[in-house]
Amino acid sequence: MNALLEAYAEVAGADAVQHLIQLAAPLRGMKVVHVNSTRAGGGVAEILHKLVPLMQALELDTRWETITGDGPFYQCTKAMHNALQGQPAPLSDVLIKAYEDANARTAETLGPVLREADLVFIHDPQPAALIRHVTDRQGKWVWRCHIDASHPQRGVWRYLRGFVADYDASVFSLADFAQRLPHPVYLIPPSIDPLAEKNSELAAWQVLETCQRFEVDPDRPLMLQVSRFDRFKDPLGVIAAYRLARTFMPGLQLVLAGGGADDDPEGEAVLAEVNRAAEGDDDLKVLLLPSDAHATINALQRAAHFVLQKSLREGFGLTVTEAMWKGKPVIGGDTGGIRLQVVNHHTGFLVSTPEGAALRVRYLHQHQELREQMGIKAREFVRQNFLLTRQLRDYLTLMTGLLH
Ligand code: UDP
């Protein structure tokens, strides 16, 4: 087994990696190409940085290519992204032309590679139109949508669908996000990378040091929510739950950790509301973290006794997976992808109100042993369902189905 596979076997389990090796064996040597729009920044690039070497380690001849364009191209694809997420974002003819031109130009350079590939994964809308320009395709083409496209703007989706319908299959992250298409539609949920800085093991002193840095007392119980400052994440509801829980757990502390909000006017307003609600309470810390604070988030999730993700609406909720992987049962809002992860009473609790969340905090506080058992179940649930190795297993299964 090569070193990368061994590293994954160590954290994700030898059984998971053995399964990958078995699934990949009949596909060995096949030419696979992933195309997206950037090598840096964003969740898709993050996944591909891990997935491509892992596929190569399994002896699939895997390449990663990107589409590039000019200003109007990115304006167009940004508008498409927003429109797929339901925001009004009309596309002018100029933007559409920039989109189609960039796809035509990229098809010229990548043509030979794409034409002879056994499997082409096109990620998100940016390179979706490549298929129009690559004739004599030898392999199967899959459109992989990472976006919550449950309520797209009709016009934009109709336009994109014109390209997507030509693919052999498409993949969405959750059933709620999927669209009706004239080919097989697969559901492949998101995953986290257990070897990433945010999820790798930490020494106890690293966790302690992070607590000290933020003046959190490691000897008193700690509640945590990691989230952008967004109303749908319900930070004020979390504060209300904390205040209620404190009436029966006087030493309780709360950390709300989130990213910067400079490009999001609503985020700033929510942060201001949260800061106001937190004023004068030394046990309630509102942390504004830089976007690369992975080790800090890792340590906070490990330090927490009670992890909340009290969202009112949620796509998948990667923070839930991250905390569960660290052996924490999660008290999560009864919505979206949180329901896929939090198996009520087993890997955490589903709640709909601050009162419900506070009661679950108290319950977990009073049942220390049960909390630990639920944490073990939570980690195992993530290991089986939401690690990168499982996502790759799903891709390999899909490839097997399409190629045979
Ligand atoms: N995150 C982060 N810094 C923050 C807040 C969140 O790095 O200040 C990360 C978090 O660890 C998770 C992702 O951003 O990996 C958020 O994903 P999720 O699906 O939970 O929510 P979204 O923000 O996509 O709605």
Image (cartoon, grey):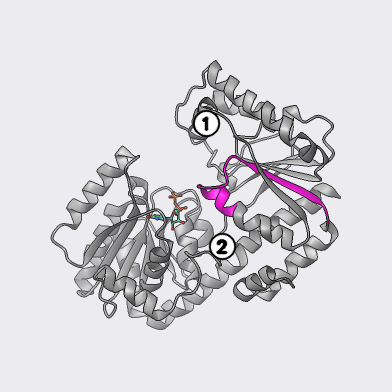
What is the crowding at mark 2: few (fewer than 14 residues within 10 Å), some, or many (at least 20)? many
**Residue drawn where x is 65% and y is 35% of the image:** 180
Q: Which residues are magenta?
A: 29-47
- Between 11 and 178, the one lying in front of the other is 11
Query: Residue at 28% across / 69% down in the picture?
Result: 213
Observer-nearest of 378 and 93: 93
Left or right: residue 187 compared with residue 285: right
Q: Which residue is mark 2?
A: 193
Q: Is mark 1 within 8 Å of ligand 1?
A: no
**What percent of the width, then of the height, locates residue 384?**
62, 67
Number of numbered discs present?
2
Does the numbered disc 2 mark a residue whose Cβ is under 8 Å from ligand 1? no
| Residue appearing at x 35%, y 68% in the figure | 360
The location of residue 320, given as percent across then percent down, is 46, 61
| Residue 138, quarter of the rendered image | top right
**Element type where label 1 sits in the image:** helix
Mark 1 to mark 2 CA distance (whole Å): 28 Å
Q: Quadrant of residue 115?
A: top right
**Mark 2: which secondary structure?**
loop
Q: Quadrant of the N terminus?
A: bottom right
Q: Is residue 38 magenta?
A: yes
Q: Residue at x 21, y 53 (%)?
A: 275
Within 10 Å of disc 1 (Cα), the crowding (few <14, some 14-19, many 20+) is some
Residue 21, horizontal then vertical, whole percent? 77, 66
Q: Residue under circle 1?
A: 74
Ranked by sequence position, the earlier of labels 1 and 2 is: 1
Asked whether the viewer can see residue 165, the reply is no
Type of amino acid under label 1: Tyr
- Type of amino acid under label 2: Asp
Of residues 168 and 10, the one nearer the viewer is 10
